[in-house]
Amino acid sequence: MADIFLKRGGEPAATYVPNIFIDEYMAQANGEFVKIYLYLLRCMGDTGGAPLSISDMADRFDHTEKDVKRALKYWEKMHLLRLEFNEKEELAGICLLDSPAMHDAPDEPGPKPRTTDADASQAAPAREAETARREYTPDELMQFEEDDAVQELLFVAERYLGHTLNNTEIQTILYWFDRLHFSQDLIESLIEQCVAKGHSSVRYMDKIALSWAEQDIHTLAQANEESDRHSSAVHTVIRSFGISGRNLVDYELAYVRKWAGEMGFSDEIIASACQRTIRSAHRISFEYADTILGSWKKQNVCSLKDIELLDAQYQEAQKNAAGKTASRRTAKGTTVNRFSGFPQRTYDFEELEKELLTR
């Protein structure tokens, strides 16, 4: 087989991505966080420090502003950028750092980084030490064996993975349970979901676990809530209703779960219901949209074509009803008097005239 040579047809605009980011940080980071960091690099190379807003980034990636802030805080914790705040505690600058060593670089002119008190400054190292990965000794493993929850957890993991756990896999699962403080349900759900998607590697699962830990997710309820907030159906509702600057609250998420889960509607159908709600009610109303979707469910709507067919049938019914109403009005408009019910007589006026002349 001949060698393949890569060629470039021109000199397109490019964004420089540090190798250390690809080698050390990208694999373990949440995919949405990676998007934000790459976009910052792109903006830095393109604008050279032009103004940038949280809302602009949220709109570009169809995120909420809270999602963008969470990503920025994550990369700040990874020492790849520094957030700078003004006197009103408002984000006023983002300084991209070339390497972790740049975290200790002298301050630059402009808004100063936000400072914290002594307790807060000591909390970060303490937390890193608490969650630091370590290998458990044989004595510690023996102690874990006496914990019924741990034994059940390892048993369930073996059932899902289909083989006896090796020492590395046991150490990793214990790390989630002991150091990351994940609940038993959360760990079992993590393993179940990964296996169901064809990823049976505990190393792959560990990357997801680290991502959850960075987002302060430690229970199954928190993981489900985070999944709901970032599901495609939720983004569809936020975009269709024009919601900005906030996430959906619990009762709103319950509606979205109902529409996408219990009713089984696609994002397109949910979007259509939300858009019709705005056109009819002129406001955001989850109750109104629920009424529309409930009606479609009863009529076995499964696609946008089904909705178009219902619309056509409705328009035809309205047209027929309007025609009947017009006919009744026309009939009522005819003048009817009290003599109209009797048979009318006809006269031959020439014969009457001859009869009168004869007389």
Image (spheres, rainbow, N blue to C red):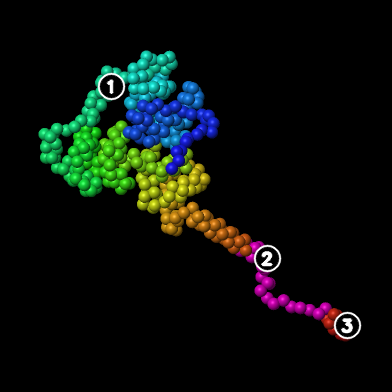
Q: Earlier in the sequence, mark 2 or mark 3?
A: 2
Q: Whole-percent x and y of residue 137?
A: 14, 32
Please give the count of numbered marks on the rendered protein. Answer: 3
Q: Residues within 10 Å of mark 2 (few under 14, many from 20)?
A: few
Q: Residues within 10 Å of mark 3 (few under 14, many from 20)?
A: few
**Residue lying at 43% horizontally and 16% vertically, measured from the top left:** 110
Q: Is-magenta flag for residue 288?
A: no
* Quadrant housing residue 342: bottom right
Which residue was labeled with disc 2? 335
Q: Choose between 108 and 355: the one closer to the eye.
A: 108
* Residue kind at label 2, given as amino acid type: Thr
Q: Earlier in the sequence, mark 3 or mark 1?
A: 1
Which residue was labeled with disc 3? 357
Q: Secondary structure at mark 1?
A: helix
Give the residues drawn in magenta, as a range.
Answer: 328-349
Q: Is residue 322 visible?
A: yes
Q: What is the quadrant of the C terminus in the image?
A: bottom right
Q: Residues within 10 Å of mark 1 (few under 14, many from 20)?
A: few
Q: Tell me if residue 320 comes above or below residue 186 in the rendering.
A: below
Q: Whole-percent x and y of residue 269?
A: 46, 50
Which residue was labeled with disc 1? 120
Mark 2–mark 3 Cα distance, whole angstroms, equals: 40 Å
* Residue kind at label 1, given as amino acid type: Ala
